[in-house]
Amino acid sequence: MNEDQDKLIAELVEKGLAGDMEPINEIEDRVLRSKAKAALVKAKRSAKPQETEDHVKKVSDKSSIDDKSLSENLNENIGEMVNEKFPGSLVNENTETHIQLAPDHWFEIAGWLKSEPSLSFDSLQCQTGIDIGENTLEARYNLHSMKHNHCTEIRISVSINKPVIPSVEQIWRIADWFERETYDMLGIEFSDHRDLRRILLPDDWEGWPLRKDYQVQETYHGIEVPKMKEGWE
Amino acid sequence: MGILEHRFQDNVIVEKLDKLLSWSRSTSPWFFQFGTACCAIEMMAAAASRHDLMRIGMIPRSSPRQADVMIVAGTVTMKMALRVKKLYEQMADPKYVVAMGSCATSGGPYWQHGYHVLKGVDIVIPVDVYVPGCPPRPEALIEGLLKLQEQILNERPLTRKMA
Protein backbone atom coordinates (compact mmCIF):
# COMPACT_ATOMS: atom_id res chain seq x y z
CA MET A 1 0.00 0.00 0.00
CA ASN A 2 2.77 2.46 1.04
CA GLU A 3 4.86 1.71 -2.02
CA ASP A 4 1.91 2.37 -4.26
CA GLN A 5 1.30 5.64 -2.45
CA ASP A 6 4.96 6.70 -2.88
CA LYS A 7 4.82 5.89 -6.58
CA LEU A 8 1.64 7.87 -6.95
CA ILE A 9 3.10 10.87 -5.09
CA ALA A 10 6.24 10.79 -7.24
CA GLU A 11 4.13 10.83 -10.41
CA LEU A 12 2.01 13.70 -9.07
CA VAL A 13 5.10 15.70 -8.11
CA GLU A 14 6.52 15.26 -11.60
CA LYS A 15 3.29 16.48 -13.12
CA GLY A 16 3.16 19.37 -10.63
CA LEU A 17 6.70 20.43 -11.47
CA ALA A 18 5.69 20.46 -15.12
CA GLY A 19 2.90 22.89 -14.17
CA ASP A 20 -0.05 20.49 -14.13
CA MET A 21 -1.70 20.85 -10.70
CA GLU A 22 -5.05 19.23 -11.55
CA PRO A 23 -4.23 15.60 -10.68
CA ILE A 24 -3.14 16.66 -7.16
CA ASN A 25 -6.22 18.75 -6.57
CA GLU A 26 -8.44 15.93 -7.79
CA ILE A 27 -7.28 13.51 -5.06
CA GLU A 28 -10.10 12.89 -2.66
CA ASP A 29 -8.03 11.50 0.24
CA ARG A 30 -7.01 14.62 2.20
CA VAL A 31 -3.98 12.99 3.81
CA LEU A 32 -2.64 11.80 0.47
CA ARG A 33 -3.32 15.18 -1.13
CA SER A 34 -1.45 17.10 1.59
CA LYS A 35 1.44 14.62 1.39
CA ALA A 36 1.64 15.13 -2.37
CA LYS A 37 1.57 18.91 -2.00
CA ALA A 38 4.31 18.86 0.65
CA ALA A 39 6.47 16.67 -1.59
CA LEU A 40 5.89 19.07 -4.46
CA VAL A 41 6.94 22.10 -2.36
CA LYS A 42 10.03 20.21 -1.19
CA ALA A 43 10.95 19.29 -4.76
CA LYS A 44 10.50 22.88 -5.92
CA ARG A 45 12.63 24.23 -3.05
CA SER A 46 15.49 21.85 -3.74
CA ALA A 47 15.36 22.65 -7.44
CA LYS A 48 15.30 26.44 -7.01
CA PRO A 49 18.73 27.23 -5.46
CA GLN A 50 20.50 25.21 -8.07
CA GLU A 51 18.75 27.11 -10.76
CA THR A 52 19.60 30.56 -9.28
CA GLU A 53 23.21 29.54 -8.69
CA ASP A 54 23.50 28.53 -12.31
CA HIS A 55 21.98 31.82 -13.28
CA VAL A 56 24.38 33.86 -11.14
CA LYS A 57 27.33 31.89 -12.41
CA LYS A 58 26.34 32.50 -15.99
CA VAL A 59 25.91 36.24 -15.40
CA SER A 60 29.26 36.63 -13.63
CA ASP A 61 31.05 34.59 -16.30
CA LYS A 62 29.61 36.77 -18.96
CA SER A 63 30.53 40.08 -17.28
CA SER A 64 34.06 38.97 -16.45
CA ILE A 65 34.63 37.90 -20.04
CA ASP A 66 33.29 41.24 -21.27
CA ASP A 67 35.49 43.27 -18.88
CA LYS A 68 38.53 41.26 -19.77
CA SER A 69 38.05 41.60 -23.49
CA LEU A 70 37.43 45.33 -23.11
CA SER A 71 40.54 46.01 -21.10
CA GLU A 72 42.61 43.70 -23.26
CA ASN A 73 41.41 45.29 -26.43
CA LEU A 74 41.62 48.88 -25.22
CA ASN A 75 45.37 49.33 -25.64
CA GLU A 76 45.30 47.51 -28.99
CA ASN A 77 42.37 49.62 -30.15
CA ILE A 78 44.13 52.81 -29.15
CA GLY A 79 47.30 51.59 -30.84
CA GLU A 80 45.45 50.90 -34.07
CA MET A 81 43.62 54.22 -33.94
CA VAL A 82 46.85 56.11 -33.28
CA ASN A 83 48.56 54.29 -36.13
CA GLU A 84 45.70 55.20 -38.45
CA LYS A 85 45.44 58.82 -37.36
CA PHE A 86 49.12 59.63 -36.77
CA PRO A 87 51.10 57.16 -38.91
CA GLY A 88 54.63 56.50 -37.74
CA SER A 89 54.22 57.74 -34.19
CA LEU A 90 53.70 54.28 -32.68
CA VAL A 91 57.22 53.10 -31.84
CA ASN A 92 56.42 49.61 -30.63
CA GLU A 93 53.68 47.47 -32.20
CA ASN A 94 53.34 45.53 -28.95
CA THR A 95 50.67 47.42 -27.02
CA GLU A 96 49.88 44.76 -24.44
CA THR A 97 50.73 46.79 -21.32
CA HIS A 98 51.44 50.29 -22.58
CA ILE A 99 51.66 52.40 -25.70
CA GLN A 100 55.13 53.49 -26.75
CA LEU A 101 55.05 56.72 -28.73
CA ALA A 102 57.56 58.92 -30.52
CA PRO A 103 57.80 62.44 -29.08
CA ASP A 104 57.18 64.29 -32.37
CA HIS A 105 53.37 64.50 -32.46
CA TRP A 106 52.71 63.92 -28.77
CA PHE A 107 50.87 67.23 -28.27
CA GLU A 108 48.42 66.48 -31.11
CA ILE A 109 47.97 62.87 -30.00
CA ALA A 110 47.30 63.97 -26.42
CA GLY A 111 44.68 66.44 -27.56
CA TRP A 112 43.07 63.74 -29.66
CA LEU A 113 43.12 61.22 -26.77
CA LYS A 114 41.23 63.71 -24.66
CA SER A 115 38.69 64.82 -27.26
CA GLU A 116 37.96 61.50 -29.04
CA PRO A 117 34.48 60.52 -27.72
CA SER A 118 35.17 56.78 -27.58
CA LEU A 119 38.30 57.33 -25.44
CA SER A 120 37.82 60.72 -23.69
CA PHE A 121 40.84 60.47 -21.40
CA ASP A 122 39.92 63.50 -19.33
CA SER A 123 42.26 62.88 -16.41
CA LEU A 124 46.03 62.62 -16.28
CA GLN A 125 46.53 60.62 -13.11
CA CYS A 126 50.31 60.59 -13.00
CA GLN A 127 53.21 61.80 -15.06
CA THR A 128 56.71 60.78 -14.14
CA GLY A 129 60.11 60.13 -15.62
CA ILE A 130 62.66 57.36 -15.44
CA ASP A 131 66.28 57.05 -16.44
CA ILE A 132 66.12 53.57 -17.96
CA GLY A 133 69.86 53.45 -18.72
CA GLU A 134 71.62 53.18 -22.08
CA ASN A 135 71.44 56.97 -22.46
CA THR A 136 67.67 56.93 -22.57
CA LEU A 137 65.19 58.90 -20.52
CA GLU A 138 61.53 57.99 -20.50
CA ALA A 139 58.43 59.99 -19.61
CA ARG A 140 55.35 58.05 -18.59
CA TYR A 141 51.76 59.22 -18.56
CA ASN A 142 48.93 57.37 -16.80
CA LEU A 143 45.64 58.37 -18.32
CA HIS A 144 42.15 57.65 -17.03
CA SER A 145 38.71 58.33 -18.42
CA MET A 146 36.03 59.32 -15.94
CA LYS A 147 33.36 58.69 -18.55
CA HIS A 148 34.29 55.16 -19.62
CA ASN A 149 36.27 54.20 -16.51
CA HIS A 150 39.21 52.83 -18.46
CA CYS A 151 42.87 53.71 -18.27
CA THR A 152 46.05 53.35 -20.25
CA GLU A 153 49.73 54.17 -20.05
CA ILE A 154 51.72 56.17 -22.57
CA ARG A 155 55.51 56.02 -22.63
CA ILE A 156 57.80 58.32 -24.57
CA SER A 157 61.53 57.66 -24.75
CA VAL A 158 64.09 60.31 -25.63
CA SER A 159 67.86 60.35 -25.90
CA ILE A 160 69.74 61.77 -22.91
CA ASN A 161 71.64 64.07 -25.28
CA LYS A 162 68.51 65.79 -26.56
CA PRO A 163 65.72 65.18 -24.03
CA VAL A 164 62.88 67.26 -25.50
CA ILE A 165 59.22 66.24 -25.31
CA PRO A 166 56.23 68.45 -26.23
CA SER A 167 54.44 69.67 -23.13
CA VAL A 168 50.82 68.62 -22.55
CA GLU A 169 50.39 71.23 -19.83
CA GLN A 170 47.83 73.08 -21.97
CA ILE A 171 45.75 69.91 -22.42
CA TRP A 172 45.72 68.58 -18.86
CA ARG A 173 46.44 71.49 -16.48
CA ILE A 174 47.65 69.06 -13.81
CA ALA A 175 50.64 68.31 -16.05
CA ASP A 176 52.06 71.73 -15.18
CA TRP A 177 53.63 70.65 -11.88
CA PHE A 178 54.13 67.01 -12.94
CA GLU A 179 56.30 68.15 -15.82
CA ARG A 180 58.13 70.65 -13.65
CA GLU A 181 59.02 67.83 -11.26
CA THR A 182 60.17 65.56 -14.09
CA TYR A 183 62.25 68.45 -15.41
CA ASP A 184 63.65 69.08 -11.92
CA MET A 185 64.69 65.48 -11.31
CA LEU A 186 65.68 64.24 -14.79
CA GLY A 187 66.22 67.31 -16.92
CA ILE A 188 63.65 66.35 -19.56
CA GLU A 189 62.72 69.58 -21.30
CA PHE A 190 59.05 70.00 -22.04
CA SER A 191 58.84 72.33 -25.02
CA ASP A 192 56.08 74.97 -24.98
CA HIS A 193 55.60 74.60 -21.25
CA ARG A 194 54.64 78.08 -20.06
CA ASP A 195 56.49 78.00 -16.73
CA LEU A 196 59.25 75.42 -16.85
CA ARG A 197 61.30 76.00 -13.69
CA ARG A 198 62.66 73.70 -11.02
CA ILE A 199 59.94 72.92 -8.49
CA LEU A 200 61.65 71.24 -5.50
CA LEU A 201 65.34 72.05 -5.72
CA PRO A 202 66.62 75.63 -5.67
CA ASP A 203 66.73 77.39 -9.04
CA ASP A 204 70.54 77.51 -9.10
CA TRP A 205 71.07 73.81 -8.35
CA GLU A 206 73.44 72.01 -10.70
CA GLY A 207 72.67 68.65 -12.26
CA TRP A 208 69.69 66.32 -12.45
CA PRO A 209 69.51 64.16 -9.31
CA LEU A 210 67.54 61.16 -10.60
CA ARG A 211 69.83 60.51 -13.55
CA LYS A 212 72.08 57.51 -13.15
CA ASP A 213 75.25 59.52 -13.88
CA TYR A 214 74.41 62.26 -11.34
CA GLN A 215 77.40 63.83 -9.58
CA VAL A 216 76.58 65.68 -6.36
CA GLN A 217 77.89 69.23 -6.56
CA GLU A 218 80.65 70.08 -4.09
CA THR A 219 79.44 73.34 -2.59
CA TYR A 220 76.19 75.23 -2.61
CA HIS A 221 76.51 78.95 -1.74
CA GLY A 222 79.60 78.21 0.30
CA ILE A 223 77.97 75.36 2.20
CA GLU A 224 79.75 72.09 1.67
CA VAL A 225 77.50 69.42 0.16
CA PRO A 226 78.63 66.22 1.90
CA LYS A 227 79.60 63.23 -0.15
CA MET A 228 78.02 59.89 0.46
CA LYS A 229 79.28 58.58 3.81
CA GLU A 230 81.38 55.43 3.55
CA GLY A 231 81.09 52.39 5.79
CA TRP A 232 77.61 52.94 7.11
CA GLU A 233 75.85 49.93 5.67
CA MET B 1 45.47 100.42 42.34
CA GLY B 2 47.35 97.20 41.91
CA ILE B 3 46.37 94.13 43.84
CA LEU B 4 49.72 94.16 45.64
CA GLU B 5 49.25 97.67 46.99
CA HIS B 6 49.19 97.99 50.79
CA ARG B 7 49.56 94.27 51.28
CA PHE B 8 53.25 94.29 52.04
CA GLN B 9 55.37 96.57 54.16
CA ASP B 10 57.74 98.85 52.31
CA ASN B 11 60.72 96.79 51.35
CA VAL B 12 63.99 97.02 49.52
CA ILE B 13 65.65 94.18 47.61
CA VAL B 14 69.29 94.61 46.86
CA GLU B 15 70.51 92.67 43.82
CA LYS B 16 72.91 93.12 40.97
CA LEU B 17 71.41 94.69 37.83
CA ASP B 18 73.29 92.08 35.90
CA LYS B 19 71.41 89.29 37.58
CA LEU B 20 68.06 91.05 37.24
CA LEU B 21 68.60 91.39 33.52
CA SER B 22 69.54 87.76 32.98
CA TRP B 23 66.68 86.63 35.24
CA SER B 24 64.13 88.63 33.25
CA ARG B 25 65.55 87.36 30.00
CA SER B 26 65.55 83.75 31.08
CA THR B 27 61.92 83.78 32.24
CA SER B 28 60.49 85.03 28.97
CA PRO B 29 62.41 83.76 25.97
CA TRP B 30 59.88 84.16 23.20
CA PHE B 31 60.45 81.69 20.43
CA PHE B 32 60.18 82.04 16.71
CA GLN B 33 57.20 80.13 15.35
CA PHE B 34 58.64 78.31 12.37
CA GLY B 35 58.94 74.62 11.55
CA THR B 36 60.61 72.87 8.66
CA ALA B 37 59.34 69.28 9.02
CA CYS B 38 57.55 66.79 11.26
CA CYS B 39 59.31 67.99 14.45
CA ALA B 40 57.15 71.09 14.13
CA ILE B 41 54.13 68.96 15.05
CA GLU B 42 55.76 68.09 18.37
CA MET B 43 56.69 71.72 18.84
CA MET B 44 53.03 72.65 18.32
CA ALA B 45 52.01 69.98 20.81
CA ALA B 46 54.49 71.42 23.30
CA ALA B 47 53.05 74.89 22.82
CA ALA B 48 49.43 73.70 23.02
CA SER B 49 47.36 73.34 26.18
CA ARG B 50 48.54 69.93 27.46
CA HIS B 51 52.22 70.80 27.73
CA ASP B 52 51.72 74.57 27.63
CA LEU B 53 55.04 76.28 26.96
CA MET B 54 53.50 79.48 28.32
CA ARG B 55 54.10 78.01 31.81
CA ILE B 56 57.80 78.64 31.36
CA GLY B 57 57.25 82.01 29.75
CA MET B 58 57.61 80.96 26.13
CA ILE B 59 55.24 82.51 23.63
CA PRO B 60 55.40 81.81 19.88
CA ARG B 61 56.12 84.93 17.83
CA SER B 62 55.59 85.09 14.09
CA SER B 63 58.32 87.59 13.32
CA PRO B 64 62.07 87.13 13.77
CA ARG B 65 62.27 90.72 15.04
CA GLN B 66 60.19 89.86 18.09
CA ALA B 67 61.76 86.50 18.89
CA ASP B 68 64.65 85.61 21.20
CA VAL B 69 64.86 81.89 20.52
CA MET B 70 64.80 80.08 17.20
CA ILE B 71 63.68 76.47 17.44
CA VAL B 72 64.85 74.77 14.25
CA ALA B 73 62.25 72.00 14.15
CA GLY B 74 62.98 69.54 11.37
CA THR B 75 65.00 68.71 8.28
CA VAL B 76 66.85 71.66 6.78
CA THR B 77 67.43 71.32 3.05
CA MET B 78 70.08 73.24 1.17
CA LYS B 79 67.34 75.47 -0.23
CA MET B 80 66.05 76.16 3.28
CA ALA B 81 69.51 76.62 4.80
CA LEU B 82 69.92 80.01 3.16
CA ARG B 83 66.52 81.09 4.45
CA VAL B 84 67.25 79.83 7.96
CA LYS B 85 70.48 81.80 7.97
CA LYS B 86 68.70 84.92 6.78
CA LEU B 87 65.99 84.57 9.45
CA TYR B 88 68.65 84.09 12.13
CA GLU B 89 70.38 87.25 10.98
CA GLN B 90 67.11 89.14 11.18
CA MET B 91 66.63 88.28 14.87
CA ALA B 92 67.69 90.90 17.40
CA ASP B 93 70.45 90.18 19.91
CA PRO B 94 70.55 88.42 22.34
CA LYS B 95 69.44 85.41 20.31
CA TYR B 96 69.58 81.68 20.91
CA VAL B 97 69.08 78.60 18.74
CA VAL B 98 67.65 75.23 19.70
CA ALA B 99 68.28 72.42 17.21
CA MET B 100 65.31 70.12 17.63
CA GLY B 101 65.40 66.51 16.44
CA SER B 102 68.07 64.42 14.78
CA CYS B 103 67.71 66.11 11.36
CA ALA B 104 68.53 69.56 12.71
CA THR B 105 71.38 68.22 14.87
CA SER B 106 73.09 65.94 12.36
CA GLY B 107 71.03 65.29 9.23
CA GLY B 108 69.23 62.36 10.86
CA PRO B 109 67.93 59.72 8.47
CA TYR B 110 69.39 61.69 5.55
CA TRP B 111 72.89 61.40 6.98
CA GLN B 112 74.14 59.10 4.26
CA HIS B 113 72.13 59.55 1.08
CA GLY B 114 70.44 62.94 1.35
CA TYR B 115 72.31 64.85 -1.31
CA HIS B 116 70.35 68.06 -0.69
CA VAL B 117 70.01 67.91 3.13
CA LEU B 118 72.12 70.08 5.43
CA LYS B 119 73.91 67.74 7.84
CA GLY B 120 73.11 69.66 10.98
CA VAL B 121 71.94 73.24 11.23
CA ASP B 122 75.11 74.16 13.18
CA ILE B 123 76.90 74.31 9.81
CA VAL B 124 75.16 77.63 9.07
CA ILE B 125 74.14 79.09 12.47
CA PRO B 126 75.50 78.69 16.05
CA VAL B 127 73.41 76.28 18.16
CA ASP B 128 73.01 76.55 21.95
CA VAL B 129 70.96 73.44 22.78
CA TYR B 130 70.61 70.18 20.89
CA VAL B 131 67.46 68.13 21.54
CA PRO B 132 67.84 64.54 20.28
CA GLY B 133 64.95 62.37 19.12
CA CYS B 134 63.09 61.61 15.90
CA PRO B 135 60.98 63.51 16.65
CA PRO B 136 61.57 64.34 20.35
CA ARG B 137 58.58 64.21 22.69
CA PRO B 138 57.31 67.56 23.95
CA GLU B 139 58.80 66.69 27.36
CA ALA B 140 62.22 66.37 25.75
CA LEU B 141 61.81 69.73 24.03
CA ILE B 142 60.72 71.33 27.31
CA GLU B 143 63.79 69.90 29.04
CA GLY B 144 65.97 71.38 26.32
CA LEU B 145 64.27 74.75 26.74
CA LEU B 146 64.74 74.61 30.53
CA LYS B 147 68.44 73.93 29.90
CA LEU B 148 68.49 76.99 27.66
CA GLN B 149 66.83 79.08 30.37
CA GLU B 150 69.44 77.85 32.84
CA GLN B 151 72.14 78.95 30.43
CA ILE B 152 70.55 82.39 29.99
CA LEU B 153 70.17 82.75 33.78
CA ASN B 154 73.89 82.20 34.27
CA GLU B 155 74.83 84.86 31.77
CA ARG B 156 76.10 88.24 32.99
CA PRO B 157 75.31 90.63 30.14
CA LEU B 158 76.78 93.73 31.83
CA THR B 159 79.94 92.17 33.18
CA ARG B 160 82.93 92.74 31.00
CA LYS B 161 84.40 89.45 29.99
CA MET B 162 87.92 88.91 31.32
CA ALA B 163 90.24 87.97 28.56
Image (cartoon, rainbow, N blue to C red):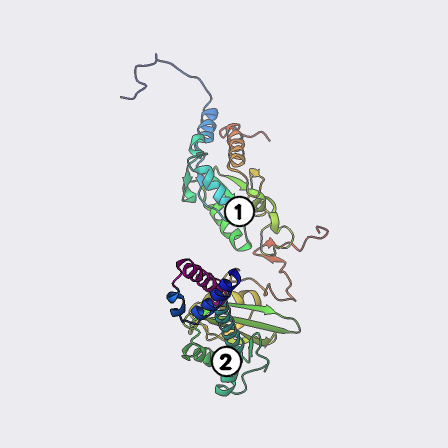
Q: Is residue A89 magenta?
A: no
Confirm whether the magenta stretch covers residue A47.
yes
Check contact, mark 1 vs mark 2: CB within 8 A: no
- Residue at x 39%, y 15% (from the top left corner): B12
Q: Is residue B146 above or below residue A76?
A: above
Q: Which residues are magenta?
A: A28-51
Above or below B156: residue B100: below
In this image, A16 relative to B130: left or right?
left
The chain identifier of the residue carrying mark 2 reads: A
Camera-nearest residue between A198 and A149: A149
The residue positioned farthest toward the front in the image shown: A1
Task: Give the image location of residue B8, x and y in percent.
Answer: 34, 13
Label 1 to label 2, Cα distance in Å?
A: 48 Å
Q: Amino acid at mark 1?
A: Gly
Three-letter code, disc 2: Ile
Residue at the disc numbered 1: B74
Q: Residue furthest left?
A: B1
Residue occupying the point 46% across, 81% down: A108
Question: Residue A218 location in percent, x, y?
Answer: 63, 58
Dot 1: chain letter: B
Q: Position of residue B98 (x, y in %)?
A: 53, 39
Between circles 1 and 2, the one closer to the viewer is 2
Residue nearer the viewer, A45 or B95: A45
Q: Which residue is mark 2?
A: A78
Q: Secondary structure at mark 1?
A: loop
Q: Say whether mark 2 and mark 1 are on the same chain.
A: no
